[in-house]
Image (tube, rainbow, N blue to C red):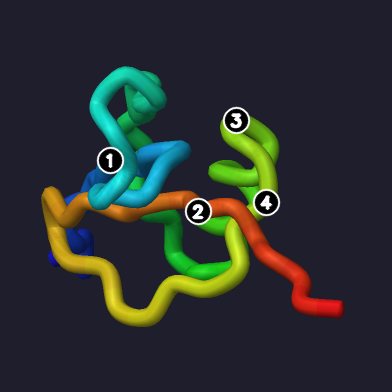
Amino acid sequence: MTDKTHPRKCTVFPFHPSEHKENRRYGIVLWVPHTLEELVKTAQDKLGKILDADMISDGQKLYSVSETQLI
C-alpha cells in the first residue's frame, strides 16, 4: 500500500482582491508542492515576488500583492 496524498491546487493572483477590476489580470493555477518554499518559488517565477503565505487549502485562492516601502 502506498501513502499517496491527493495533490492540491491553488490559484495565485497578481493583485489584491480590493484593487479596481480594470487593473486586474488573470491568475495562474499551480499544484501545491510538498513545501511552501517550492510553491513560493514557482509563483515567483510565474508572477513575481510573493512575500508570505501561511496555510494553503485545496482550491484556495492566493493573492500576490505589491510590496510598499515606507521611507
Which residue matches tag 3? 46
Nearest the eye: 20 or 32: 20
Instruction: Determine the image quadrant of residue 54.
Output: bottom left
Q: Are marks 1 and 2 in contact (CB under 8 Å)?
A: no
First-in-chain label (3 vs 2): 3
| CA distance separating discs 1 and 2 | 14 Å
Name the quarter where the C terminus is drawn: bottom right
Q: Does residue 39 sit above or below 3 in this rendering?
A: above
Gap in angstroms between the C-alphas marked 3 and 2:
14 Å
Residue furthest out toward the right: 71
Nearest the eye: 32 or 47: 47
Which class describes the residues within 10 Å of circle 1: few (<14), some (14-19), or many (20+)? some
Identified by mark 4, the residue type is Lys
Can you tell which mark lies on residue 48? none
Dot 3 or dot 1, earlier in sequence: 1
Q: Is residue 55 above or below residue 50?
A: below
Q: Nearer the viewer, mark 3 or mark 2?
A: 2
Q: Which residue is mark 2?
A: 65
Q: Which numbered disc flags the more N-terminal residue, 4 or 2?
A: 4
